[in-house]
Every structure is written in C-alpha cells, then in structure tokens.
Amino acid sequence: MVIKVVGGIIKKENRYLIGRRGPKEKMAGFWEFPGGKLEENESKKECIKRELKEELDIVVVVGELISEYQYSYSDISYHLYFYRIDDFIGEPIPIVHDRLIWAKSNDFKKYNFLPGDNPLIDLMLNNKV
C-alpha cells in the first residue's frame, strides 16, 4: 500500500517553515515540512491548501510542484509531493506541531527530519529545487 502525501515548502526571505511533530503524532519529535495525506477525490493542490489551513491556520497560494518521489519505511510506503507555496495569509500557528521555526536551508542538518524528507532536503541543499 502506498499513501500519497502532499507537503508545502513555505519560504520567507531566506528561511523555510518547518514543524516538529507533537507528542501525540506518529514519529513524534521529528521535524518536517507541513502537509498531509491526500484524501479521495481531492487534487494535490486542494490537499495542501486544506492541510496548511488545518495544521497552521493559514490560507495559501500554491505554486509549482518542486519534487515528487516515493519513500518506503519498513512497514509502509509514501508517494510524496512537495509544492512551493508562493504566498500565504495569516501567521502560522502550531496546531499539530509542538514547535514551528523558520530555518535556513544550510541549518537543516541540525534538525532530525523525518527520513522521508531527506531526499528533498538533499535536493534543496544542492540547489536542485
């Protein structure tokens, strides 16, 4: 079984918004780019708009798809889609995360990201996206 997940890459100046998964979440304590599971009959852009409203209480303008790949853990596989967020209204608040920060890409290695986000981070650090 493959679960489709859509993430948002939100950039302000030269920093990216990342969130740490809260204690009640699966893989608590790991950092991630906000987003979530694609629901049935939902487009990927509709998904990321919904997820960022639910997780951060912001309204977003979704840009282009910047990366897509499949990542498998020992028990489950995810097809991951990451969209650039061109603009947003509101100030992000941590609803499902226990912490939000604006991090520079060259500081990403200081954070314990979900393993599934590492291929995207490698692309970002090599200026491929």
Image (cartoon, grey):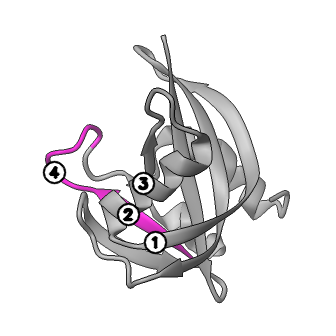
State how many labels appear: 4
Magenta span contains residue 76: no
CB atoms at circles 2 and 3 under 8 Å apart?
Answer: yes
Whether tag 1 and tag 3 are in contact, CB under 8 A, the answer is no
Q: Residue at x 56, y 58 (%)?
A: 8
Residue contact at pointers 3 and 4, CB within 8 angstroms: no
Residue 55 x %, y %? 32, 60
The residue carrying mark 4 is 23
Residue 33, given in percent of the width and then of the height, sits at 49, 57
> Can residue 23 be found in the magenta stretch?
yes
- Asked if residue 110 can be seen in this view, the reply is yes
First along the sequence among labels 1 and 3: 3
For residue 16, what is the image quadrant? bottom right
Q: Which mark is residue 59?
A: 1
Q: For numbered disc 4, what is the local secondary structure?
A: loop
Amino acid type assigned to the residue bearing label 3 in the image: Arg
Image side of residue 76 versus residue 119, left or right: left
Residue at 44% over, 17% down: 76
Q: Amino acid at mark 1?
A: Val
Start and end of the magenta stretch? 16-27
Disc 3 designates what residue? 50
Three-letter amino acid code at disc 2? Lys
Q: Which residue appears farthest toward the bottom when viewing the image?
A: 13
Q: CA distance from mark 3 to mark 4?
A: 22 Å
Q: Which residue was labeled with disc 2?
A: 53
Q: Earlier in the sequence, mark 4 or mark 1?
A: 4
First along the sequence among labels 3 and 4:
4
| Res. 126 mark | none
Give, as a three-letter code, the residue at label 4: Pro
Q: Which picture quadrant has residue 111?
A: bottom left
Q: Secondary structure at mark 1?
A: strand
Q: Nearer the viewer, mark 4 or mark 2?
A: 2
